[in-house]
Amino acid sequence: MTLDADWAERWIRRTADAVVDRRDELTELDREIGDGDHGENLVRGFRAVVAKLDARRAEAEEPGASPRLVGDVLKLTATTLMSTVGGASGPLYGTAFLRAAKVTGHPEIDTRTIVAMLESALDGITARGKAEPGEKTMVDAWTPAVDAAERAAGEGDEADALRAAAAAADAGSTATIPLVATKGRASYLGERSAGHEDPGARSTALLLAAAVEALGE
Ligand code: ADP
Ligand code: MG
Ligand code: MG
């Protein structure tokens, strides 16, 4: 198994498909504890990324084009999300992908690099949003994902690390339901935010599930 720029591109394209498929669900979650735009924000952002990937693919077919790296795909994703997604999730995911790009700018993406990529993404989200685990944000999906990837990387390969991360993000998102939000728009609801799943945690679970699906193509 090689995790190369083609894998990264499949990952991002699958994420775009997933947010389109689940747009209404993400929007509904955000309607319950936010302003109801999370699905739309991500669809707009990832569609713009796909358009950029399509344009870049056409260029790459020209003779003399330099080989692409995972980090190139992630950097393009980062800058596009930052400029097209209004709302908190744009800068947060943008920073996550930018930090992830920094550790994947070399050809060999091994298990250690996958763990570093996920850790860096979480560090970026935390640097930007200052949320800690338990505040009912996407950090509650990313934190267990990083921990699970680290554990899996001790015994398995990069696919095992990604699978463990995706499963943990899914569980982490579900576990936001009883939490009271203390960061982001949902915090305006105080105690009334309990009983609803955090939309950004759910979209994080979709994003990491797409990374796993992209392995199998
Ligand atoms: P907005 O809240 O501006 O409308 P979105 O609806 O696109 O933006 O994204 C909302 C999601 O962003 C939340 O569900 C939460 O997961 C995440 N979020 C908001 N603020 C923070 C923060 N400070 N740190 C981490 N994640 C945050
Ligand atoms: Mg919103
Ligand atoms: Mg908004």
Image (tube, rainbow, N blue to C red):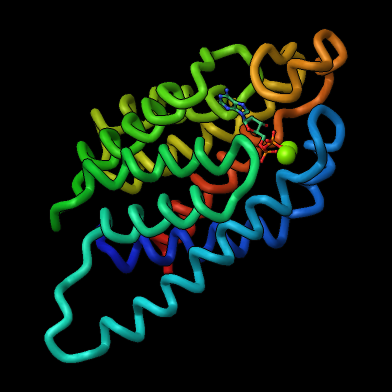
**Residue 119 placement (x, y as % from top left):** 33, 29
**Residue plotted at (49% across, 48% down):** 82
Residue 134 or residue 86, whichever sits in front? 86
Quadrant for the C terminus, please: bottom left
**Residue plotted at (58% across, 66% down):** 47
**Residue 194, relative to residue 76: is it above or below?**
above
Q: Ligand 2 sits in which quadrant?
A: top right
**Residue 30 placement (x, y as % from top left):** 78, 37
The reply, left or right, for residue 101 in relation to residue 207 is left
**Residue 138 placement (x, y as % from top left):** 58, 29
Spot the residue most to the top: 191
**Residue 186 placement (x, y as % from top left):** 75, 22
**Residue plotted at (79% across, 31% down):** 34
Spot the residue most to the bottom: 63
Image-quadrant location for residue 174 = top right
Quadrant for the N terminus, please: bottom left
**Residue 138, relative to residue 175: is it above or below?**
below
**Residue plotted at (32% across, 38% down):** 99
The reply, left or right, for residue 190 in relation to residue 3 is right
Residue 212 or residue 100, whichever sits in front? 100
For the image, the number of numbered tags is 0
Q: Let me know if residue 188 appears in the view.
A: yes
